[in-house]
Image (spheres, coloured by chain):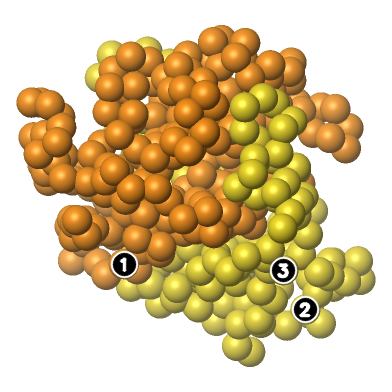
Chain colours: A yellow, B orange
Amino acid sequence: MSKTKRPASTSTSIHDLISHRWSPRAFENRAVEPEKLRALFEAARWAASSYNAQPWYYIVGTKDDPTNYQRVLDSFVEFNQGWAKSAPVVGLSVAQLKFGHNNEPNSHAFHDVGQASATLQIQAEALGLSVHQMAGILPDKAREIFKIPEGFAVVAGFAIGYEGDPKTLPDGLREKEVAPRERKALDSFVFSGAWGHTSPIVAKK
Amino acid sequence: MSKTKRPASTSTSIHDLISHRWSPRAFENRAVEPEKLRALFEAARWAASSYNAQPWYYIVGTKDDPTNYQRVLDSFVEFNQGWAKSAPVVGLSVAQLKFGHNNEPNSHAFHDVGQASATLQIQAEALGLSVHQMAGILPDKAREIFKIPEGFAVVAGFAIGYEGDPKTLPDGLREKEVAPRERKALDSFVFSGAWGHTSPIVAKK
């Protein structure tokens, strides 16, 4: 099955890699080529970060290594395990909470992991792959399984693969998979001058 | 001046919008077309977020509105004001710290603002624009100036515009502007099985 076209209903034209990116729960039973997978993390590598601290780390499991794949899956909440197990690749993002150069707290650690993961997702889109990130993970269990040291926080889980047929999903999830994609209105979150004052940049024309 | 080609030295091929994205400090004295600016925030709008909470907010100032532009600039630390004032657009990102649906803390608020801002930056790249984000801001001052309510945190500053000539920068910054872009090695942050074990996906070939 090829990638579904489910472009966002944008208020102005944006790049296809951004408007077509979404987070499916159905994945094809098909491995991701190692070279493509490498490119995803290479893309994450070049994200921007505060003091160029690059606080991002990733733990990855692929189905050709069933033991390690299962260890990642075990770090997800049960609901997410239910659908993520169809993906050929699963993983966790981890944030380094202090700066290496002075050991002070990095208040942008989660922010910058988010930047790296968003960049990874856009690279995935460019390669015809899909990524579904999830907050529903078990950070303490992940820390124990993977021996994640103090000073690092488990941030999010993710599933990567080729988008699959929504029909393979159970009731409830199937409907969500094909429902229109929704976002709050642009004029509700871009302000100028004072909080709550819609910027003229995004005001309805 | 057209956009400098300063592609990242990647270990494998990634999309141009990602490898060419970087954060200049020199900007051309040239306004950003309103339609392009709108597209940047529209791109941010379609980022992924935990529970689709979309915790991102932006406060923006453009030079054609000098009072509000200055209010944003005043929210940056002095060092950043020094170079950012050459940019035609400056702004702040803000995170909503609790979920709207249950008023519980959203531990991914900063993470998801990071995702939105990274998406904004890639859209900027697609339009020939550059974005420089900065952690060096004065959150308390910004809160006061813009009357940002409780439950929201000021996250980061940013400058947007067309990349300028590094020669316009003072000594020190000029050298940084043209220095090679650097990142930690891919095999130092992508693990499998256990913390610190480089994943075969990214192992040196």
- In the image, residue B96 sits, relative to residue B161, either above or below, namely above
Residue behind mark 3: A9
- In the image, residue A147 sits, relative to residue A182, either above or below, namely above
Q: Residues within 10 Å of mark 3 (few under 14, many from 20)?
A: few
Could you say which is closer to the camera, residue B72 or residue B184?
B72
Chain of the residue under label 3: A
Residue behind mark 2: A166
Residue lying at the far bottom of the rendered structure: A1
Q: Is residue A3 left or right of residue A175?
A: left
Residue A125: where, in percent of width, then height? 50, 70
| Amino acid residing under circle 3 | Ser
Q: Nearer the viewer, mark 1 or mark 2?
A: 1
**Residue sitting at x 30%, y 34%:** B86
Residue behind mark 1: B16
* Callout 3: SS: loop
Residues at discs 3 and 2 both on one chain? yes
Residue A43: where, in percent of width, then height? 36, 58
Q: CA distance from mark 3 to mark 2?
A: 21 Å
Residue A5: where, in percent of width, then height? 65, 81
Residue B103 visible in the picture: yes
